Amino acid sequence: MLQYRTDLAMEAHELLCAKSRAQTLSGVDSRTVFRRGCSVTSVRIDTEGAARQLGKPRGRYVTLDLSPLQKNADDVLERASRAVGAELRALLGENVKSVLVAGLGNANMTPDAIGPRSAEHVLVTRHLRQNGAFSAFCSVSVLTPGVLGRTGIEAMETLRGTVRAVQPDAVIAIDALASRSLMRLCSTVQLSDTGIVPGSGVGNHRCPLSRDTLGVPVYAIGVPTVVDAATLTLDVLEEAGKSDVDPAALRGHETVMVTTRDIDAQIRELSRVIGYGIDLALQPLDFSELCALMG
């Protein structure tokens, strides 16, 4: 039986609810609110049974739909960055004073480059904390571990060694994800406190990054940049009211990834939103001060 492929907990919950004709699943708390100009859906997976059903680890998942903000190009960067920053700050809590930001993915493959590109916009402060002007800042270091095919080293191995040396309170990992819907590509951001599996967005699953593997809490920021061809076909047929699809006709197309034709521009804009959102979540800066520092 063919299944929709998605890395978004919100979509996985929607699919299972539709299948069981229920509003929510046992062991899952899901609610949607509208704040800071965008829709914010929080999914909390409380039980192991629900985690198995959804195929996601237990924990919190916060999904922001930035599409309403993207319609107003004048201040989209500021409003979207503020929205991401506020939700990330709430997820991190008050006790995180030092962070290692990991930009995961292949910078040479555009749909997978959101991690490395976002890392370029993160304000690095670990080496400045002894300077009085930065004493109130969160200690932030950044690493882009690359991909196994180019380094021969798993991202988890690189990050584990760096965590031992730097000893951050937490890791924030940024990576590309896969969605079940073209409508959510490059317009949705998922935050979670459950860690992440590098490469999942482009179908190249690697060793997971989690508290178990790195020894500190791992928060994930994911942006859906691709849909696999089989999932896209199922989604289009469902919209057309056709559900009697022969699974054999789609088998093998799960390895074909589809993205938007303007993915270069989308990644360029979203990477600033993610990077600035992290900065606003961690540092005592307003948006204008951040822009002045980052140039």
Image (cartoon, helix red, strand yellow):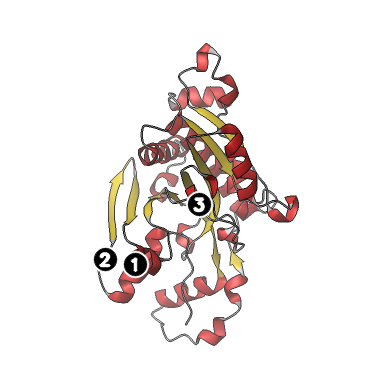
Q: Is residue 240 above or below residue 53?
A: below
- Which comes sooner in the sequence, label 2 or label 3? 2
Residues under numbered marks 2 and 3 in contact, where contact means CB atoms less than 8 Å apart: no
- State the residue at coordinates (48%, 79%): 2
N-term mark: 3 or 1 = 1
Choose the circle earlier in sequence order: 1 or 2.
2
**Residue 82 seen anywhere in this rendered image of the structure:** yes
Give amino acid for label 3.
Answer: Val
Mark 2 is on which residue type?
Answer: Ser
* Quadrant (top left/top right/bottom left/bottom right) for the C terminus: top right
Q: Could you tell me residue 274's position as x and y percent?
A: 50, 41
Q: Which residue is mark 1?
A: 49
State the image coordinates of residue 99 (x, y, percent, origin top left): 51, 34
Question: In the drawing, what numbered circle is on residue 26?
Answer: 2
Mark 3 vs mark 1: in front: 1
Residue position marked by numbered label 3 in the rendering: 223
Q: Position of residue 81 (x, y in %)?
A: 45, 37
- Residue 147 at x, y percent in the picture: 68, 52
Q: Residue at x 31, y 70 (%)?
A: 17
Q: For marks 2 and 3, give the one nearer the viewer.
A: 2
Regarding mark 3 in the picture, which secondary structure is present there?
Answer: strand
76 above or below 131?
A: below
Instruction: Tell me the distance, in whole angstroms, between the alpha carbons under discs 3 and 1.
Output: 26 Å
Which mark is in front, 1 or 2?
Answer: 1
| Residue type highlighted by circle 1 | Gly
Distance from Cα at disc 1 to Cα at disc 2: 9 Å
